[in-house]
Structures are given as C-alpha cells and as structure tokens.
Image (spheres, helix red, strand yellow):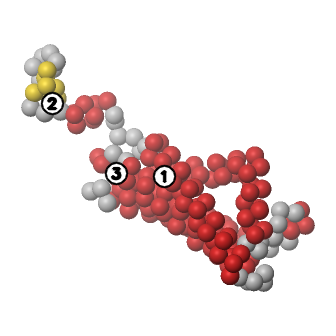
C-alpha cells in the first residue's frame, strides 16, 4: 500500500481516508471508557483539592458552632463543581464524531466515581476523610456520632448526590458541545 492524496491506496485501487477507516474499525459506541475514566480521575482530584482547601479555611476562620454547617455546605458545592469539571473533561475527551453522547458519558463519571469512593472508604481511606472532617468541625467517626445523624443531613446528602450527578451530565454535554 502506498500513501496517496491523504489516504491509503488499497490493492484494488480504491483510496480510503482515515475517517473511512475509523468509521469501519471504530463504530460509534455510546460509552467512551477512556474519556469516562479520565473525567472520573479529574473529578476525584478536584474534589480532594477543594475539600482540603475547605478544611484549611474552616480550621482558620470558623468557630466550633458554625463549622459543621459551613463544612456541609462546602462539601456539597465541591461535589457539584468537581463532577461538572469531570464531566466536562469527559465530553472534551470524546471523539468529535460521537460527541452527541456527552451528557451520557458525563453522567457515567459520577456512576464510576461512587463505587470507587465507597471502596476507598471501606478500605480505610475513609479514616483520612474523617480526620479532615474532624478538623473542619464535623462529628468524628465514633459510633455515637453516627447515630446522631438527622434526617435532614441524609436528605441533604441525597439531594447533593443527585445535583452532582446532574452536574456531571451537564459538564459532559458542555464539553462535547464545545468541540463542535
């Protein structure tokens, strides 16, 4: 095979461009796992950095009575920001021809990150988060504190999770749309 006119000249005399080869060998898939993984890792890194920033600010500036509320609000906002950025990275990392699935792939960032974060918590890395939570004024990791969690906190966590999932989908859509 020889190169001619920006494509490959085949044995039968036909010329195929790289787009023709890509369409033949890489059919449009709804999920681009490489892009989803990159978005997930970016989202988790952004979340870590912003949570550390929030813990540092909380320790320095807030009193023990206002710190738990401020920390809870900060954590919710950080989740939304981090997953939007992760979704956006996913949308930008997709093939331009298949960017119509940006929101779907962005939502998958959240779906992939949740079991990873749960696994890290189960493996003991949750103690690190508890340590930072204790620094920022949250209740520590004791069993007594766990039983004092109110319904409002659980509902707030659920609502924040849904908002973070939506933010990841919107980020994926925005990242994919910016390619066009």
- x and y percent of residue 71 in the render? 68, 74
- x and y percent of residue 8 in the render? 16, 26
Q: Earlier in the sequence, mark 1 or mark 2?
A: 2
The residue under the point 48% across, 48% down is 38
Label annotation for residue 99: 3
Q: Mark 1 near mark 2, Cβ–Cβ under 8 Å?
A: no
Depth check, front residue: 14 or 82: 82
The residue under the point 58% across, 62% down is 49
The number of callouts visible is: 3
| Secondary structure under the numbered disc 3 in the rendered image | helix
Q: Mark 3 vs mark 1: give the one in front.
A: 1
Residue 6 left/right relative to 57? left
Q: Earlier in the sequence, mark 3 or mark 2?
A: 2
Residue 101 left/right relative to 111? left
Residue 32 left/right relative to 128? left
- x and y percent of residue 84 in the render? 48, 63
| Secondary structure under the numbered disc 1 in the rendered image | helix
Residue 94 drawn above or below residue 179: above
Image quarter where the C terminus lies is bottom left
Give the residue pinned by disc 2.
7
| Secondary structure under the numbered disc 2 in the rendered image | strand
Question: Is residue 24 in view from this perspective?
Answer: yes
**Occupied quadrant, residue 60:** bottom right
Query: What is the CA distance from the residue labelled 3 to the residue labelled 1?
Result: 15 Å
Label annotation for residue 39: 1
């Amino acid at each position: 095979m020889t190169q001619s006119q920006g494509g490959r000249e085949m044995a039968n005399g036909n010329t195929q461009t790289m787009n023709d080869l890509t369409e033949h060998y890489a059919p449009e898939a709804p999920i681009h796992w490489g892009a989803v993984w990159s978005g997930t890792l970016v989202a988790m890194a952004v979340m870590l950095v912003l949570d550390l920033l929030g813990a540092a600010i909380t320790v320095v500036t807030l009193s023990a009575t206002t710190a738990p509320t401020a920390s809870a609000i900060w954590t919710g906002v950080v989740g939304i920001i981090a997953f939007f950025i992760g979704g956006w990275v996913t949308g930008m990392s997709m093939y331009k021809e298949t960017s119509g699935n940006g929101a779907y792939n962005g939502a998958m960032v959240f779906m992939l990150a949740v079991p990873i974060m749960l696994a890290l918590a189960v493996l003991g890395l949750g103690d690190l988060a508890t340590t930072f939570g204790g620094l920022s004024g949250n209740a520590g990791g004791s069993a007594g504190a766990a039983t004092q969690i109110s319904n409002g906190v659980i509902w707030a966590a659920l609502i924040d999770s849904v908002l973070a999932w939506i933010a990841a989908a919107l980020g994926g859509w925005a990242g994919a749309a910016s390619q066009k």
